[in-house]
Image: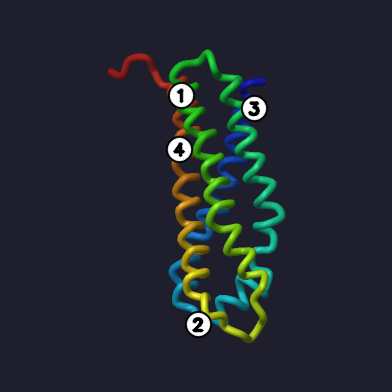
Amino acid sequence: MLFVWRFITIVLVALSMASSFCHVMEMPPRLRWEPSLWMAATTFGGLYHLFGRIGAVIDVGAAIASATLVVLVRARRPAFQLTLVTAILMALGLAVWFAFVAPMNQIMATWTPGVIPGDFTTVRDQWERSHAVIAGIKVMGFASLVLSILVETRPQAIA
């Protein structure tokens, strides 16, 4: 059971991290785009449509799987502490999304094609930077998850 749950958690956390890291890799060119192109691609073009539908399920699944794994490894030290860090970081990634990205999504939902809103730069920059912060949080969460497994598989003595 633990083996299977670790596998499920690794896959979900990796997928969650990967989708967030995509935002980081795309950010530099997107920040150079004209406002009309940025809005056409991100707000009106549906470029991130599946991030909201499939990505949301993966993100919530990764947080739930991590929290469940904490319970399953509670008697295993130091795997427990590292897995707990993973669960906290995955939950923190969701919290940052709800606190900083979701409000920008709501504002962007009111924008009209062809009209550059006065708050464009502020909204775009918060949306972009918040995604980058979330990606960093998830990278640390994934690293902690991997370490939680590696600490149980390392040799006792290194020659």
Q: CA distance from mark 1 to mark 4?
A: 13 Å
Q: Nearer the viewer, mark 1 or mark 3?
A: 1
Instruction: Say which label, 3 or 4, has the lower sequence index.
Output: 3
Name the residue that disc number 3 marks.
Answer: 5
Please name the residue that numbered disc 2 is placed on.
34
Which numbered marker is on residue 81? 1
Please tell me whether mark 3 or mark 2 is closer to you in this view. 2
**First-in-chain label (3 vs 2):** 3
Horizontal side of residue 150 vs 44, given as left or right:
left
Q: Earlier in the sequence, mark 1 or mark 3?
A: 3
CA distance for labels 2 and 1: 46 Å
Q: Quadrant of residue 105?
A: bottom right
Question: Which is closer to the viewer, label 1 or label 4?
Answer: 1
Left-right relation of 29 to 46: left
N-terminal of the pair, mark 1 or mark 4, is 1
Q: In the image, what residue occupies the spot 64% across and 27% down?
A: 5
**Crowd class of label 4 (few under 14; some 14 to 19; many from 20; radius 10 Å):** some
Image position of 21 with respect to 12: above or below: below
Contact check, label 1 and label 3, Cβ < 8 Å: no
Foreground tag (4 vs 2): 2
Q: Residues within 10 Å of mark 1 (few under 14, many from 20)?
A: some
Label 1: state its secondary structure. Answer: helix
| Vertical arrangement, residue 129 with respect to residue 112, above or below | above
**Residue drawn at point x = 46 percent, y = 61 percent:** 129
- Say which quarter of the image contains residue 2: top right
Foreground pick, 21 / 156: 21
* Circle 4: element type: helix
- Residue tagged 4: 143
Circles 2, 1 touching at the beta carbon (< 8 Å): no
Determine whether label 1 and label 4 are within 8 Å by CB: no
